[in-house]
Image (cartoon, grey):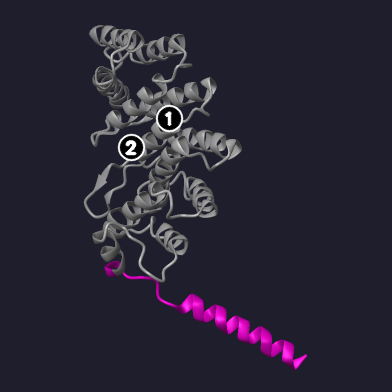
Amino acid sequence: MLRNVVSIAIVLLAMLAVTAQPQHDKEFWRTILKQHAVVPEHESADALAHELSATLASPDPEVRDDLAYSILATWIHRGNVLSTPTLISLTDEWRANLKSGLGETGTDSVLKRSFSALCLSEMARREAKAPFMGPERYHSLVAEATSYLRQERDLRGYDAKLHWIHATAHTADLLAALGESPQLSKEEADSILQAIQFRLSTATEVFTQGEQDRLAIAVVSVMRRKDFDASAFGSWLARLQDEDRDVWTATTPESLARYQNHNYLLEALTVRIVMEPDSTRMADYRQQVVKLLRTR
């Protein structure tokens, strides 16, 4: 009995010792970044990735953005750095983070959600080129990403203290990356358009930090698809126009913000379509958008 108690105590002490070990400091991560994100000798990339993941919620913009996100994004796209189990576990961790503190506004909790969405965009880009998630996880992520775009209430772009927050832009990046996968269904493509419309229609202020352009990139990502429903796109444009019909007869700050957000999206979308390789299909989409802009 005594021997068992001693054994348990030794295990607990060992666990405490591991927990008590200080995490790597900023200088450690700065050095990695300066050395092109090469994993240091005698270090585990998988363990380091999980350590970095825990700092995505940091209010320190250097830790969160310059170091954690930058290094994680590099490792995700270097095919031989992170193991598949780690890619999957990080994906699931970041998916869960999208709901952490959801509904709060003006708090630091948005950082975990926003930067998890940004890191998930890198996972989705890798998934499009070298699938590792599996269909069920991929389709769940599409649903979670569109839901998150609709439900996020903290729409700050840049903060003087926290620097980039940018939840809307980061989620747009995620949707754009998900749109690159051949796994995306026509219904999911439509759900991306609907989520973007909802986000722009319900924002109470005009986005000023490039969000409309990032959302336009997400729209173009699904428009490129051979199975994209052209009639659904026309209906989507018509709904945007219908929402704005009363803007000059019953103008409120909210209706004007919606109108301007729609306008800026359509302008960004026009430019993005023009930048696409020439095709009859894309030319038709551009014509539809320009025609709508001329009537506003």
Q: Amino acid at mark 1?
A: Glu
Judging from the image, what secondary structure is the residue with disc 2 in? Answer: helix
Q: Quadrant of residue 21?
A: bottom left
Label 1 crowd (10 A; few <14 / some 14-19 / many >=20): many
Q: Quadrant of the N terminus?
A: bottom right
Label drawn at residue 199? none
- Residue ID at (43%, 61%): 45
Q: Name the spot of residue 184 as percent of width and height, x first.
A: 51, 27
Whether the magenta-drawn stretch holds residue 207 is answered as no
Q: Mark 1 or mark 2: which comes first in sequence? A: 2
Residue linked to disc 1: 180
Does the magenta-highlighted stretch encompass residue 17?
A: yes
Quarter of image, res 250:
top left
Instruction: Tell me the quadrant of the picture where the C terminus can be found.
Output: top left
Q: Residue 274: x percent and y percent?
A: 25, 17
Magenta range: 1-27
**Residue 260: which quarter of the image?**
top left
